[in-house]
Image (cartoon, grey):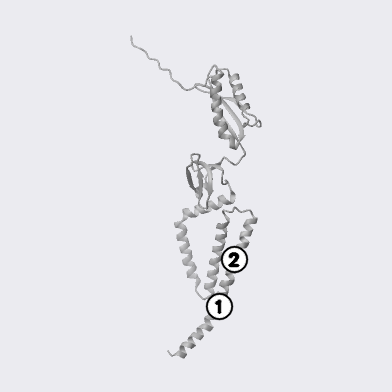
Amino acid sequence: MNTEEIIDQMTAMAVLYGPKLIGAILVWIIGGLVISVLNRVVKGALTKAGTDPSLMPFLTGIVNGLLRVMLVITVLGMLGIEMTSFIAILGAAGLAVGLAMSGTLQNFAGGVMILLFKPFKVGDVIEAQGYTGSVSQIQIFNTILKTPDNKTIIIPNGGLSTSSMVNYSTEPKRRVDWTIGVGYGDDLDKARAVIKRLCDEDARILKDPEVVIAVSALADSSVNFAVRAWVNAPDYWGVYFEMNEKVYKTFGAEGLNIPFPQMDVHIHKDS
């Protein structure tokens, strides 16, 4: 093949593929600009909708990725590359990756659901998956809890979003429950009055709803009072622990008995 034939072939290829190549380059450039604009529009729409800031990078990333894939497929199609087999291979690869990462994808979906519907937020005290603690971080795959004794608990979002959970921080008020026992034969009216006085003296116990003091059970060794008082959520544990101590000290001073299980052993001596 001489030089003239090579030049002729190159010219023919330039005439045949040049417009396609130029068009593909233009589409790639313009498409990139359009995707940038769409990303800003999506981000602005999410901001106006009040979407959680932790969720926005992931949603915008997904949108950007999908648009980029569409742009690549469009450009390759313009260059005359057969896309049917490419898409089939891409789909098979996606299926294989999806199966291999099913647990990870479940956690990702769970994280998105938590960030969207906000069943809890950072700082809330929750009980889930057998653990209780304060929410330290809400990540896209995991939620981080800090326990009262400063342990770090990492809970995958997949199970967290599909199972039962208790949020202790949702309501501003909580009810504190005690079971206080007095001995059989003690003055129940006096015991009730002492408990009522202790509740009235604690300014953290709310007056409305009113404190409930009622006999709940005639147990084996005690008459049990059920005491129910309402407090502001941050005061819950302080009121609970301090009231136990006050009852113990005051009952003793008032001559009221706090019974405890005991066993009498009788020894019979053979004559």
Nearest to the observer: residue 20 or residue 242? 242
* SS of the residue under disc 2: helix
Image mark count: 2
Outermost residue, left direction? 271
Nearest to the observer: residue 267 or residue 50? 50
Residue at point 49%, 73% (across, down): 82
Q: Which residue is mark 1?
A: 22
Alpha-carbon distance for marks 1 and 2?
21 Å
Nearest to the observer: residue 133 or residue 18? 133
> Taking the image as drawn, is residue 217 in sight?
no
- The residue mark sitting in front, 1 or 2, is 2
Residue at point 54%, 66% (across, down): 68
Q: Are marks 1 and 2 in contact (CB under 8 Å)?
A: no
In the depicted structure, whether residue 245 falls above or below residue 38: above
Q: Which quarter of the figure is the N terminus placed in?
A: bottom left
Q: Which residue is mark 2?
A: 36
* SS of the residue under disc 1: helix
For disc 2, the neighbor class at 10 Å (few under 14, some 14 to 19, many from 20) is some
Which quarter of the picture shows residue 263? top left
**162 sits to left or right of 193:** left
